[in-house]
Image (cartoon, rainbow, N blue to C red):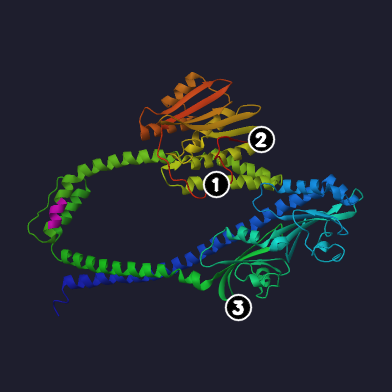
Amino acid sequence: MAKSNSFYHRLLRMLVVVGVLPLFFIGLLTYGFSRELFLEQYGRMALARVGASAESLDRLAEEYGDIIGALAEDEGIREAIASGMEERREDIEQRIHLLLAGRTIKPSVYVLDRQGRLSFGTDELPAVYNPVRQAGWGIFRIAHEGGPQPKVYAHRHEAAGGRVATLSLIRTLGNDRGETIGYVIADVYRDDLERLLLKEDMPFSTSYLVLDRYGFTVLNTAHPELEGTLDRNGYRRIIAESEEQVRIGRDEGGERVIFFAESAKTGLSVIGLTPYEAVSASTGYIRNLFASAAALSLLACLAFAYGMAKRMSTPIIGLVKGMKRVSRGDFSVRVSATGSDEFGLLASGFNQMTEQIEKLLQSVKEEQQRFHVAELKALQAQINPHFIYNTLDLIKWSAKMNETDQINTIVTQLGRLLRGVIHVKREKVTVREELELVDSYLNIQKIRFSDRLFFQFRIDPDIMEATIPRFTIHPLVENAIVHGFENKNGKMFLVVSGYREGGNLVFEIIDNGIGMTQETIGRIFSGRNGHSTGILNVHKRIQLYYGESWGIRIASEPGKGSVVTVVMPWPEVMPRPEDMSRMGGEPHAESRGH
């Protein structure tokens, strides 16, 4: 009894209780919070993916609308339809194919007169398109609603070749007197629509559903047999009644996470359905992780409590006094290290600590110096705040002028630029990745300068996968824009070229800006020019990586422009990725201009 009430055992029990109980409750709270956070983040990701699908539908509708609009306004086509000129077929169909050239998703396009006697198109006209038999209803009814702009109509029919069309765009074809003389129709096929939506990959066996405003099922990736029927699970009602775009619901397949987005240009609803059980089960790894961490923490807590109780049960006054003297800055203090128990070892360690303190302080200073070097490197990855301000100001004025396409372009390019800065953590990137950032930056500046800025990439395709220090080209291009073009009138031209020259990799940034004197160039490399630090920083970084034989050269003449040349040794080449289309036509050829 006396032994169990000793200072050692009482201290041990106290340390165990103090250590284990908070650990237990914190573990429970953290697990619950992490699980809810996971579900919330999944909802945000799902909403972003389905929103991107809805935007893809908008872009598709706008693209097809432009096609049939161009055909409807074509004087040659209107004349042929009005006059029944069958001999113009080859010329008209050639015009249709020319409008469809180069498009990834190609619709079937038909031009027909109001009596259905004469038609032109990319395929044989489906029997369902009979303007006489279907006059006043179906697709021909909505064609006359609300003006001559293209209308979207959800239906289902089998076209030539067995392909199934699930969505169509139609526009009336009028004569000079405003009378309807025919129609232009574009069919969207089911397989194209499914590929458009499924490119937004989702985990947990997520399926997609596309409904029109009346509940007609345009697409159902999980149950294609239900396509062409009215929604029987009440998803239109859920959308209409829900205040949130992500919610938990139930259908005949069980409980699901339902998330949706509206396509503004088509009136369609894109709905994503994920089994709630699959999402919830995926949080099991969080439970297992916390259980393992709790077990390890419990063992560590017990071991720590035992060790602490053992050591603190013996006199420690001498050690405490020595530590107080150390806290006052007296590193000459030494404590008694007699005995071979734990406190004897602790005392010896304490003595060794005081002897090593100056060495540790020196190490701290050296570490701080290395930190400053790393900090200098990190500064290279910062976007000029004036550029961000100017870009946001440009978005503001574009919004006031209702230039939605321009806003979309600016936001897309700015998003790509910020993702490249924030998410890429490697010190070195490929030339292709570096040029993606440069291209986004220049596209924003081109809008800002009201198309006075013209730029071109002349990049040897063989160097696109070569690795270079991150932010090697971007600061030089930004310097050319900010200091070379800001005070320049007239058109501005900028060329970024890259090639391999023997054992070197060479980049040139050429502009027709205001140029600079040799004195200014000297100040840049001496660090006395506070406005062009980007050039000096890139120069120093290249020399830090490769040595003083490489770096930057500048050739410039006031009033005529500058040529900034970057030379570095030929680096390693990363394996070419399988999918190089992510840039959507970004700099990949020997020459590309804007």
CA–CA distance between discs 1 and 2?
A: 21 Å
Using the rendered image of the protein, determine whether residue 100 is visible from the camera's viewpoint.
yes
- Label 1: few (<14), some or many (≥20) within 10 Å? some
Task: Give the quarter of the image for residue 285.
Answer: bottom left
Q: Do the residues labelled 3 and 2 touch (CB within 8 Å)?
A: no
- In the picture, the quarter occupied by the C terminus is top right
Position in image of residue 311 (x %, y %): 16, 63
Position in image of residue 360 (x %, y %): 23, 44
Q: Is residue 347 magenta?
A: yes
Main SS of the magenta segment?
helix
**Secondary structure type for disc 3:** loop
Q: Earlier in the sequence, mark 3 or mark 1?
A: 3
Mark 2: amino acid: Asp
In the picture of the structure, the residue carrying the numbered disc 2 is 451
Q: Earlier in the sequence, mark 1 or mark 2?
A: 1
Q: What residue sits 74% from the left and 50% below the top?
A: 67
Q: Is residue 570 magenta?
A: no
Q: Nearer the viewer, mark 3 or mark 2?
A: 3
**Secondary structure type for disc 1:** helix
Q: Which of marks 3 and 2 is nearer the N terminus?
A: 3
